Image (tube, rainbow, N blue to C red):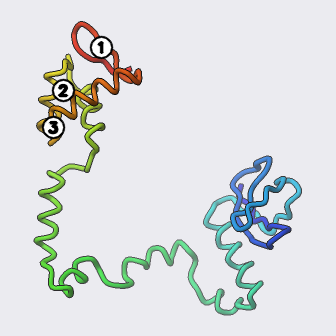
Amino acid sequence: MYAVVGCSDCQALWVVDGRPETTGCPRCGKRHRFDALKKFATAEDAATAKQARSALLAKRQGAEDAFASIDAFDDLEADLDAVGTSDEEYLTKSGIDADEVAGAKERAMGGQQSRSRREVVRDALAELDEPDAEAVVAYASEHGVPADYVRTALEKLRRSGDVIRTSEGFRLV
């Protein structure tokens, strides 16, 4: 359940999920006991609660007619892609070849999601059957991580207790 509640100090309205013991005003930061707050509206889903809060704010400002002419939030969100300039159109109008930018991004990403060096080392430890230091270095090198970084990362992971060094190599904890 979602409730639209208001602050007794600054009159801000916000949506609260569930029935917490206390909740904080997002505007002034004052903590309120949830049970003591006036519930202006309740709803079963977040979208309906947000819509109710917006209607209350519009009424407070005397803009009920303008609010009534606007679509629901879910409908507005679907229309966002049709508004404004697309990335490709912006690049083209700026004199930049959008296809070249897309190609550069693909080359930089190597066709994969971007991962940090540490994530690559951890992935090597998780994916390799017997991850000794050289196997982890080889795996990480294939993914663009320098060998000296891998060795340093393995030692830091060992000291922090995230990795155990065994006779066969390394093992994630």
Q: Position of residue 39 (x, y in %)?
A: 82, 64
Residue sitting at the far right: 36
The numbered dot on residue 136 is 2
Please tell me whether residue 151 is drawn above or below residue 17 in the rendered image: above
Q: Mark 2 or mark 3: which comes first in sequence?
A: 2
Residue receiving disc 3 = 146
Q: Nearer the viewer, residue 153 or 18?
A: 153
Q: Mark 2 or mark 1: which comes first in sequence?
A: 2
Q: Position of residue 43 (x, y in %)?
A: 71, 62
Residue receiving disc 1 = 165
What kind of residue is marked 2? Answer: Val
Please tell me whether residue 65 is drawn above or below residue 139 in the rendered image: below
Point out the image quarter for the N terminus.
bottom right
- Whole-angstrom CA distance, mark 3 to mark 1, is 21 Å
Q: Secondary structure beneath disc 3? A: loop
Q: In this image, 144 relative to 81: left or right? A: left
Q: Position of residue 54 (x, y in %)?
A: 67, 77
Q: In this image, 36 relative to 69: left or right? A: right
The numbered dot on residue 44 is none
- Whole-angstrom CA distance, mark 2 to mark 3, is 11 Å
What kind of residue is marked 3? Answer: Pro
